[in-house]
Structures are given as C-alpha cells and as structure tokens.
Image (spheres, grey):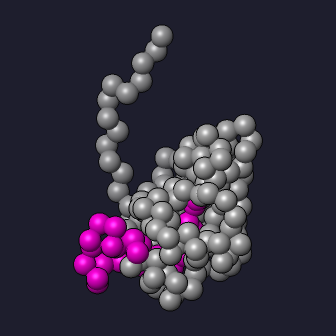
C-alpha cells in the first residue's frame, strides 16, 4: 500500500459544508470509476451509480431524503454538495449491501485524493423503496431489483473535517 493510499485513509473526513462551485465532469468520472472498481462478493459487481448533477433533480432527491426523517423544508440533507452519487446494488447478489458499501468507501477515498470533499448520506434505501423513485430508475434504463445503499455527496469542501479520537480496545489478537 502506498503512502498516498494511507494518507487518503487516515486524512479523509466527512464534509458537511460545500462551496457553490461546480465539479468538473472529469473528476466526477474518476470518482465513479473508483466506485466501479470496488471489490464485490464473487466478483458480482452488483453496485450501480447514478450521478445527479442537475439542480432540479438534486432538489427533488433532497426533498425525498428530507421526507424520510421529516427534516424541515429548508434543510439540505446533502449539505450543499453539487454532486450526488447514488449507489444502489442489485438485490440478486447476496452481498449487495457490502458491495455497495465498498463502492461508497472507494468513492470517498478517491474524492479525497482528487482534492474534493465527500460525505456518505443515508436514506437511499428508503428513498429508492418509494414507487416513484423505482419508476424513475426504470426510466433511466435500470432493470431489476435494486436497493439504495447510500448517497456519496461530493464537491469542494468549505470547511475542515474533524477526526474523532480513535477508541481503544478494538483490536484483538489470537
């Protein structure tokens, strides 16, 4: 493992405030590529990624996400990130939740390595269980039964992330 990889692992932080600055498509594509290269059970490659960059669609997705937990209408559950990479995984793969989680982590590490901030926002499962969002996936050409794993929100950070102190007693040798 290179020092660069370790640097990304040890220094990546969740960002909860993003600059109002577009992310170049080339950077978004690199982050997505990292997600597609994540490990998956039996090499199933069960995750798919939906890149949301359109402001109107972003707001519709934000409204659906807010409604899951009854956030106030003026709350942006995506913290102002200009790009939402929705990770879903095929329910046909018994390891789909783990596969999608690996894709999410790869994308967060890639975003950090490319100078972007990121945060994993939950409730993709609940949103993409709704009939209107299942229908929307079908309109995009997604066929099959997919479960929402997470929303990888990326953009240029407008804050420094803070690391929680690492808890003791989490390693056991046998």
Asked whether the viewer can see residue 83, the reply is yes
Q: Is residue 146 magenta?
A: no
Whether residue 53 is situated above or below residue 115 in the rendered picture:
below
Instruction: Return the residue found at the far right.
Output: 43
Magenta-drawn segment: 64-88
Residue 7 coordinates in the image, percent (x, y): 55, 49
Q: Is residue 105 left or right of residue 92?
A: left
Q: Residue at x 68, y 51 (%)?
A: 46
Q: Nearer the viewer, residue 99 or 13?
A: 99
Quadrant in the picture for residue 83: bottom right
Task: Look at the picture and state if 38 lies above or below 127.
Answer: above
Which quadrant holds the N terminus?
top right
Q: Which of 42 and 4 is in front in this view?
A: 42
Q: Position of residue 31 (x, y in %)?
A: 65, 64
- Image x and y of residue 33, in percent: 71, 61
Seen as rendered, the residue at the extreme bottom is 56
Residue depicted at 65% across the width and 44% down the height: 93
Find out whether residue 73 is within the magenta segment: yes
Q: Residue furthest toward the front?
A: 131
Task: Classify residue 42 as left or right of residue 79.
Answer: right
Image coordinates for residue 22, horizontal then vertical, percent: 56, 84
Q: Is residue 171 above or below residue 108?
A: above
The residue sitting at 29% across, 82% down in the picture is 73
Left or right: where 42 falls relative to 173 = right
Q: Is residue 27 visible?
A: no
In the picture, residue 109 is in which quadrant? bottom right
């Amino acid at each position: 493992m290179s020092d660069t990889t370790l640097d990304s692992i040890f220094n990546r932080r969740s960002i909860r405030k993003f600059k109002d600055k577009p992310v170049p498509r080339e950077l978004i594509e690199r982050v997505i590529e990292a997600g597609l290269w994540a490990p998956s059970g039996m090499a199933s490659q069960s995750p798919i990624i939906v890149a949301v960059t359109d402001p109107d669609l972003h707001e519709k997705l934000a409204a659906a996400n807010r409604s899951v937990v009854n956030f106030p209408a003026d709350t942006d559950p995506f913290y102002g990130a200009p790009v939402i990479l929705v990770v879903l995984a095929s329910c046909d793969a018994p390891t789909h939740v783990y596969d999608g989680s690996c894709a999410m982590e790869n994308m967060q590490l890639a975003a950090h390595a490319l100078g972007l901030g990121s945060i994993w926002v939950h409730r993709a499962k609940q949103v993409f269980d709704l009939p209107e969002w299942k229908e929307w996936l079908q309109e995009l050409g997604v066929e099959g039964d997919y479960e929402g794993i997470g929303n990888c929100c990326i953009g240029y950070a407008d804050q420094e992330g803070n690391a929680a102190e690492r808890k003791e007693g989490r390693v056991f040798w046998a």
